[in-house]
Image (cartoon, grey):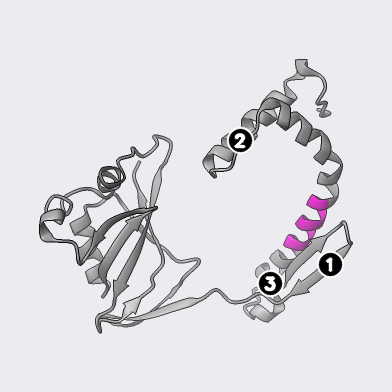
Amino acid sequence: MEFEKDDDTNYHIDFITAASNLRADNYKIEQADRHKTKFIAGKIIPAIATTTALVTGLVVLELYKIIDGKDDIEQYKNGFINLALPFFGFSEPVASPKVEYKGPNGKVTLDKIWDRFELEDITLNELIKDFESRGLAISMLSSGVSLLYASFFPPAKMKDRYAMKLSELVMTVSRKAIPEHQKEVIFEVVTEDVDGEDVEVPYIKVRVA
């Protein structure tokens, strides 16, 4: 179908408004009303084909390297494009940072960006024991702006929290319900290894539905 923003009977603008606002809601982006959407959509159509084709081509060039099995990061490239100048620049990517800690069975290496702990909706006590089995002691646990657990919290404050499921703990502390459409909750942790050294480990992703 050919896009036509001025024909209200084809519902093109209605569809774009609905689809873009769903995405905006999912990523906490400010939503746009129908009038603003119509204004934006009418301006960007000429730029889409050129920019998308260029970016897609650069991505596919890097994909060829992955398919070819290249494991030397210096053979890959970041691309920086500004068609208005015009400017085309390329640089070597930086390897994602690694974190190492001493576990019960020796040294463990994790990727800070790409690794994560994926768990079911277990209790806080089960989470603490799970990390202990990995050689990590949780000193603080948070989700968003809510501090859920800290080793310095008085026992009276934590008495009821240990038996709570992680999703229940988040809702109790934040006093907000987890949206029905949300399937996972992200937690950040501060931990110590078996030698008592602070370890900055990747985040925890908990399935709640």
Give neighbour class at mark 3: few <14, some 14-19, many 20+ (Cα, 10 Å). few
For label 1, the SS is: strand
| Residue type pointed to by label 2 | Gln
Tell me where residue 57 sits by quadrant. bottom right
Q: Which residue is mark 2?
A: 31
Q: Position of residue 48 (x, y in %)?
A: 81, 45
Q: In the displayed structure, would residue 134 be above or below residue 58? A: below
| Residue type pointed to by label 3 | Asp
Q: Which residue is at the front of the view, 74 or 37? A: 37
- Count the labels in the image: 3
Tell me where residue 190 sits by quadrant. bottom left
Q: Quadrant of the C terminus?
A: top left
- Side of 15 where 145 appears, left or right: left
Q: In the displayed structure, would residue 85 be above or below residue 10? A: below
Marks 3 and 1, how far apart at CA: 25 Å
Q: Is residue 1 magenta?
A: no
Q: Which residue is mark 3?
A: 68
Marks 1 and 2, how far apart at CA: 32 Å
Q: Which residue is mark 1?
A: 88
| Residue type pointed to by label 1 | Phe
- Front of the two marks 1 and 2: 2
- Side of 95 where 108 appears, left or right: left
Q: Position of residue 99 (x, y in %)?
A: 43, 77
Marks 2 and 3, how far apart at CA: 42 Å
Image: magenta residue range: 51-60
